[in-house]
Image: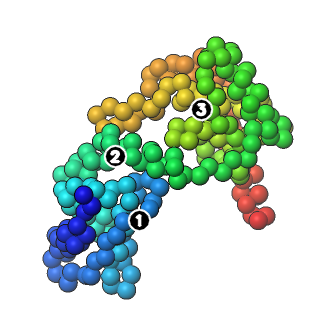
Amino acid sequence: MDADLTAVERFYQQAFEQYDKALTTPQISVDFYPYIGINHTIRVRDGRVYVRIAEVCRDMPPQAHHALAYILVSKLYRRRPPKAAREVYGDYIKSDEVRERSTDRKRAHGRKVLSGTQGEFYDLNEIFDDLNTKYFGRGLAKPVLSWSARRTYRILGHHDATHETIIISRSLDSIDTPRYVVEAVLYHEMLHVYHPTVHHNGRRYNHTPAFRRDEEKFEHFDKAERWIENNVRKLKRTVKRERSRR
């Protein structure tokens, strides 16, 4: 059953009264918004409060709406939300039902910007096949592979389980980047396919002990780590220089 928005608005009124008893309760407007994931926003404009709640949470129970109200209003006051509110809301969004619903929505409405596997210097398809043969006995299902649309330096690789995609930073597609570095980054993301995220007691574990053990099996693990550490500033300068030209 959809939430009664009038009742939900009262939760926000109560939260404002709790944080500032001297405040005249502002007008509050709450609606659902088709965010792809579980995102919520609260803004104040011309003295009126606007709250947008993710569509995926339309049937959220009243107690979770009440908790979310305290969490969002606390952000406006730069205060830490009450522990009880964090726990009630956290239990709801970490439930299997909500997590699956969010994943389904991301899969249906999310969009990946792909630029293909063939770079100027390296072919991700070829490297994937080599790594798959050497470390996985050709048993790893191939996800969608692509270089990133733009050069990046903070994130060199990313595995998106929802869209079954691995994106490698275009910054590494360079004559100055040793092949073993591209292999190391791609191998790390392949391990995310091999070792899926583990959910335990409401927490997500992406890098399990088994993941770390397998990561260190990569032949050039230490050498690749050192190269990345020594060259991250150079990658950053290249990215910023490229962005300044736009």
Circles 2 and 1 in contact, beta carbons < 8 Å:
no
What amino acid type is highlighted by mark number 2? Val
Question: In the figure, residue 181 lies in which quadrant?
Answer: top right
Disc 2: which residue:
98
Residue located 51% across and 18% down the image: 213
Question: In the figure, residue 223 lies in which quadrant?
Answer: top right
Question: Is there any visible trace of residue 205 in the rendered image?
Answer: yes
Circles 2 and 3 in contact, beta carbons < 8 Å:
no
Q: Residues within 10 Å of mark 2 (few under 14, many from 20)?
A: some
Disc 3: which residue:
189
Mark-to-mark CA distance, 1 and 3: 32 Å
Vertical position of residue 82 compared to residue 215: above or below: below
What amino acid type is highlighted by mark number 3? Glu
Closest to the observer: 14 or 81? 14
Q: Position of residue 112 (x, y in %)?
A: 62, 49
Q: Nearer the viewer, mark 1 or mark 3?
A: 1
Q: Secondary structure at mark 1?
A: strand
Q: Earlier in the sequence, mark 2 or mark 1?
A: 1
Q: Quadrant of the C terminus?
A: bottom right
Vertical position of residue 112 compared to residue 55: above or below: above
Q: Secondary structure at mark 2?
A: helix
Q: Position of residue 77 (x, y in %)?
A: 29, 69
Disc 1: which residue:
33
Mark-to-mark CA distance, 2 and 3: 26 Å
What amino acid type is highlighted by mark number 1? Tyr
